[in-house]
Image (tube, helix red, strand yellow):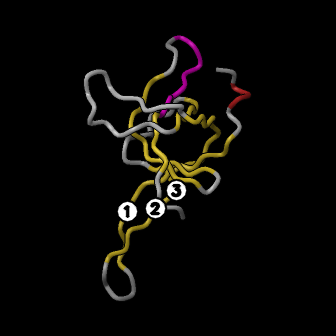
Amino acid sequence: MDIGKLRSRIQFQSESTVVNAQYSKDRVWTTDFTTWGNIKVNGGMLYSRGDNAEPSTTHIITIRNRSDVVRGMVVLSGGIRYSINRIIQGDPGKIQYLILHCEQLKDQI
């Protein structure tokens, strides 16, 4: 992939809980880091070979390689949230990329 194609600003967020003024817990999303990436709409649904239980992939997001990206994080770009379903390493021996198979979340911020 050409590095110039990483044109979308992308935030990676993790969920945590905080105690509010009424001493109950609220779910909040904290931005762990922000980077540049490429977001592509996936034309169909991708499944693991022989495994139909995996969530559908609506978008494929490519970023430069990072070791701190994990499933369970939420990707936020342009006000749209995506859950990470699968993380794939890019081409070995070249500038490394992560290819994230994501599903667009229905709940918007």
Name, please, the residue furthest toward the right: 4
Question: Tag 1, which secondary structure?
Answer: strand
Q: Is residue 98 left or right of residue 39?
A: left
**The quadrant where residue 79 appears:** bottom right
Task: Name the disc covering residue 31, or none.
Answer: 3
Name, please, the residue furthest toward the top: 93
| Residue at position x 65%, y 53% in the image | 78
Circle 1: is it few (<14), some (14-19), or many (20+) Cα within 10 Å?
Answer: few
Assess whether residue 34 is covered by the magenta stretch. Answer: no
Whichever of labels 1 and 2 marks the residue nearer the N terminus, that label is: 1
| Residue at position x 44%, y 47% in the image | 83
Q: What are the residue bounds of the magenta stretch?
A: 93-100
Can you give x and y, in whole percent of width and height, for residue 91 in the image?
Answer: 52, 15
In the rendered structure, which amino acid carries the disc numbered 2? Trp
In the rendered structure, which amino acid carries the disc numbered 3? Thr
Say which of 80 and 13 sits in front.
80
| Residue at position x 46%, y 40% in the image | 102
Q: Which residue is mark 2?
A: 29
| Residue at position x 53%, y 31% in the image | 43
Q: How many marks?
A: 3
For the N terminus, the quadrant is top right
Task: Name the disc covering residue 16, or none.
Answer: 1
Alpha carbon separation for disc pair 3 and 2: 7 Å
Alpha carbon separation for disc pair 3 and 1: 11 Å
